Amino acid sequence: MLLERIMSTNLYMVHPGTPVTDAQDLMRREHLHHLPVVDDHSRKLVGIISEKDLLYASPSPASTLNVYEMTRLLSKLTVSKVMTKKVFTATARDLVEDAARIMVDNNIGCLPVVDADGYPVGIVSETDIFRLFIDLFGTREKGLRATLRIPEEPGEIARLGEDIAGHNGNIISIGTWPGDKPTNAVCIIKVDGMTKDQFLSSVENHILEVIDIRET
């Protein structure tokens, strides 16, 4: 799947000269966790600011400053002083899994999505990835969910599908992961239209182990 299918396009952005207090207000009002920072003139991406950046910029609760002094101090502090300038980005045609890998490998919570000229056109966050994860597993649909250990052999998934279809079952979602040995894999499959006994009977000739099975 491409990022253009899951990215958020309703973008809120700030400029390097935006006061930190304004950025804080915007993030609170719109329930945002990150804000792309664009150049005042070129409108190209020059940084990104997060809730954590703003938290670190705020005076400590142990500060002797009063509320008025804190507000005055923050009003003079601009986004350019606290933003992250080295920004990892993606394009709308990048694969979702590649974006997720970049986010995990670099311990970041989002990726601004830019066009060929460097203009922000969207943003993809951990929440967007989680929503896709929910959809891929058919989490919102009722059915029978099974975790199976299967042989790591060509055509094994096709045979499972044929067996389930032969018992009038419908596959809602399916995914595979490496097993505990090179000779096996773990398959998570969700089906409807069949009972637990019917499902087990349909797949028993092609699996090594039923790790878990439950109605969801």
Image (tube, rainbow, N blue to C red):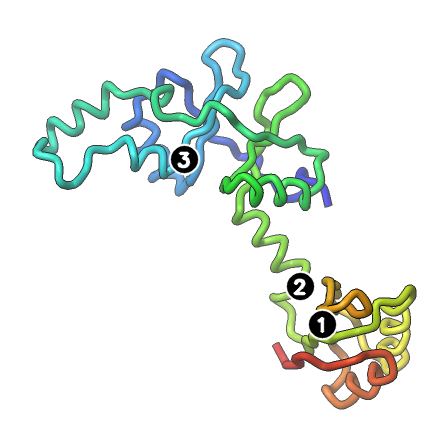
Q: Is residue 192 left or right of residue 47?
A: right
Q: CA distance from mark 3 to mark 1?
A: 37 Å
Q: CA distance from mark 2 to mark 3?
A: 30 Å
Please determine whether, in this image, residue 90 is positioned above or below residue 207: above
Q: Amino acid at mark 1?
A: Lys
Using the image as rendered, state which of residue 202 and residue 171 is in the foreground.
202
Which residue has dot 1 on it?
190
Q: Quadrant of residue 21?
A: top left
- Going from N to C along the chain, the mark reached first, 2 or 3, is 3
Residue hosting label 3: 50
- Which mark identifies residue 137? 2
Residue 42 rendering spot, x and y as whole percentages: 53, 11
Q: Nearer the viewer, mark 2 or mark 3?
A: 3
User: Would you place residue 101 above or below residue 144 in this image?
Assistant: above
Q: Residue at x 36, y 16 (%)?
A: 17
Residue at 30% across, 37% down: 55
Whether tag 1 and tag 2 are in contact, CB under 8 A, the answer is yes
What secondary structure is marked by label 1? strand
Residue pushed farthest top? 41
> Badge 2 local density, few (<14 within 10 Å), some, or many (20+)?
some
Q: Position of residue 179 (x, y in %)?
A: 73, 67
